[in-house]
Image: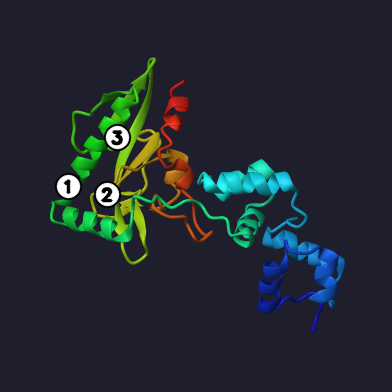
């Protein structure tokens, strides 16, 4: 077999074993046909980086941040390691982000059943009211557009600075056990299109049936057609944008309006 080629089984084995033992041990025990350079190149290509020999303070910090529900991407900055290395280490340690104890699947499904009996536009109006209240109690001045079909749902003001808000509703998908919100709008032909930054500074997503909000900057939300949200459990896959760092992130509005 060509030493430069890697099989799917070898790549899987590398990802499983890397982070437990050193690269020299990996070569000796599992990849004797690979050179040190080939092993290093593949590790860098996979983005798993140096993840063995964790210091005690790194492990303690990882545990603390995971238990606080901090996303792996941000933990990676704190410990100066690739996000995949953080995810793998947490998995090996059995450390998980907390699940909200007051939310279970039956309650979430029951909440969606109740809302399904209401007109979709009314559900949207209810969630818009929730968002206005949430912003008001946090000290933002809230102003509404005169036209109902304006792409800016509301404007918040603080110290003469403004932020344009687009409000979205996230329904619960019982099959995938996640909330999902569309971040696009429709043109006059019914085709989904993105928003313009001239109309939106932030998307604020209200999860149907529960008091959870996602404050998503325009440049993050506008690159995705939809947002999969996990306020009730950890996100298990690493694909796609992780929106969990924006959950109840009203501080982003504070920073924007300074």
Location of residue 48 by image quarter:
bottom right
**Residue in the picture at 52% in, 44% down:** 68
Image check: 16 left or right of 156? right
Q: List the residue tagged with mark 1.
A: 121
Numbered badge on residue 208: 2
Q: List the residue tagged with mark 3.
A: 152
Residue 106, compared with residue 119, is above or below; it is below
**Residue in the picture at 43% in, 36% down:** 249
Q: Nearer the viewer, residue 91 or 87?
A: 91
Image check: 22 left or right of 89? right
Q: Nearer the viewer, residue 184 or 216?
A: 216
Residue 62, given in percent of the width and then of the height, sits at 63, 48
Query: Quick check: can you spot residue 76?
Result: no
Q: Nearer the viewer, residue 55 or 213?
A: 55
- Which circle's residue, 1 or 3, is located before the other in the chain? 1
Location of residue 74 by image quarter:
top right
Residue 94, given in percent of the width and then of the height, sits at 58, 60
Residue 169, given in percent of the width and then of the height, sits at 28, 47
**Residue in the picture at 49% in, 60% down:** 236
Look at discs 1 and 2 and give the one toward the viewer: 2
User: Around disc 1, counting alpha carbons within 10 Å, would you say few (fewer than 14), some (14 to 19), or many (20 or more)?
Assistant: few
Residue 230, compared with residue 132, is above or below; it is below
Residue 79, given in percent of the width and then of the height, sits at 68, 44
Q: Residue furthest top?
A: 159
**Residue in the picture at 38% in, 15% down:** 160
SS at badge 3: loop
Asked if labels 3 and 2 touch by Cβ distance under 8 angstroms, the answer is: no
């Amino acid at each position: 077999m060509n030493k430069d080629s890697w099989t799917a089984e070898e790549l899987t084995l590398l990802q499983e074993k890397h982070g437990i033992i050193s690269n020299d041990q990996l070569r000796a025990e599992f990849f004797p046909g690979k050179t040190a350079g080939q092993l290093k190149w593949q590790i860098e290509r996979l983005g798993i980086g140096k993840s063995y020999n964790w210091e005690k303070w790194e492990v303690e910090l990882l545990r603390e941040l995971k238990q606080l529900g901090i996303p792996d991407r941000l933990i990676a900055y704190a410990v100066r390691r690739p996000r995949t290395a953080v995810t793998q280490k947490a998995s090996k340690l059995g450390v998980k982000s907390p699940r909200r104890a007051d939310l279970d699947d039956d309650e979430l499904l029951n909440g969606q059943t109740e809302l399904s009996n209401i007109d979709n536009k009314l559900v949207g109006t209810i969630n818009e009211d929730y968002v206005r209240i949430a912003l008001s109690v946090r000290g933002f001045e809230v102003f509404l557009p005169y036209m109902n079909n304006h792409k800016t749902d509301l404007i918040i003001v603080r110290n003469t600075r403004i932020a344009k808000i687009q409000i979205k509703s996230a329904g619960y998908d019982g099959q995938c056990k996640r909330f999902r919100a569309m971040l696009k709008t429709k043109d006059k032909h019914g085709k989904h299109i993105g928003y313009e930054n001239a109309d939106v500074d932030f998307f604020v997503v209200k999860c149907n049936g529960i008091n959870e909000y996602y404050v998503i900057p325009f440049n993050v939300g506008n690159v995705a057609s939809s947002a999969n949200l996990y306020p009730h459990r950890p996100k298990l896959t690493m694909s796609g944008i992780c929106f969990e760092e924006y959950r109840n992130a009203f501080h982003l509005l504070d920073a924007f309006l300074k």
